[in-house]
Image: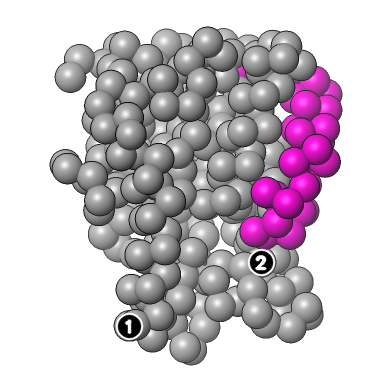
Amino acid sequence: MTIAPLPVLDGRVLVIAPHPDDESLGCGLLLASRSHKESSHILFVTDGSHSPERAGGASESARRELAEIREREAREAASVLGLPPANVEFLGLEDGTLAAQPERLTIALVDYVRCIGAEQLLIPFRYDRHSDHLAISRAVARAHADGAITATVFEYFVYSHWRLLPGADVRACVIAAELRKLDPGPEAATLKRRALECHRSQTTCLHEWQSRPVLTRELLDRACSGPELYLLQDPGRPGRQILARARHWIPIAHRLEPRLKRWKDRLSGWQGR
């Protein structure tokens, strides 16, 4: 399929990241390649304290410690991508809880978008597989449709590799005319990889019970070797209306994939996000 290139994003750009590492996975090339770093911003919504998944059952002090580690890693990654420290903000909501507080989430996101005067907004894809990603995507989509957010909204892809899809890439099911592509220049691709490797709690085995990291080498290679794709959000095309094929299967697969992964991980004795 032919995909138009992502235009130069002028003005203030805000990446809303559900967890530390999502900004680099989904938008690392974009942030690395922008010439006006002072107009790039990242808002981390949760504290990341439940990843790997088993960490969510740890003591409160252990979760706080992991949250502090992940904030330090996120700040380091943002620095690698060239963002000023003042342009990196943390809401600090508990990892995994966003779906249970939609009104609070929407108010917080709309307030922050208005506070910094964001003109270009990047949010997770509407069918990403984590509940926090979905909560953010839905909150912004509602605010965009209602006119509470007037910025141009793009959806970025973190979980684009789906085992239950023919071809395994959900991006290939989206209407090509609605997508925009950013090809990796060598310098930007290197910076994206360096930024991802700053998230050491996710790219290495932080806990002795882990048999592999949350972000495997295979996943990192896939994320850093190809282009970044973005879906230009149109409030007139909600939900599955942006799908060119597998319209009925994707919502089903979207619900099944995380469950199958959890079952697989538990059978293998490993738990991760």
Q: What residue occupies the far front of the structure in this picture?
A: 248
Instruction: Give 176 or 180, whichever is nearer the viewer.
Output: 176
Kindly identify which residue carries mark 2.
Answer: 49
Answer with left or right where residue 187 lies relative to residue 155.
Answer: left
Question: Which stretch is magenta?
Answer: 91-120
Please state which amino acid type lies under the numbered disc 2: Ser
As displayed, is residue 3 above or below residue 25?
A: above
User: Which x, y percent locates residue 105?
Assistant: 76, 40
Q: Residue at x 50, y 58 (%)?
A: 198
User: Which x, y percent locates residue 191?
Assistant: 41, 42
Q: How many marks?
A: 2
> Is the C-beta separation of discs 1 and 2 under 8 Å?
no
Please state which amino acid type lies under the numbered disc 1: Ser
Q: What residue occupies the far bottom of the structure in this picture?
A: 208
As displayed, is residue 118 above or below residue 214?
A: above
Instruction: Give 20 or 87, whichever is nearer the viewer.
Output: 20
Q: Which residue is drawn at 56% across and 67% down?
A: 51
Q: Residue at x 40, y 80 (%)?
A: 266
The N terminus sits in image quarter: top left
As displayed, is residue 101 above or below residue 189?
A: below
| Magenta span main SS | helix
Disc assigned to residue 268:
1
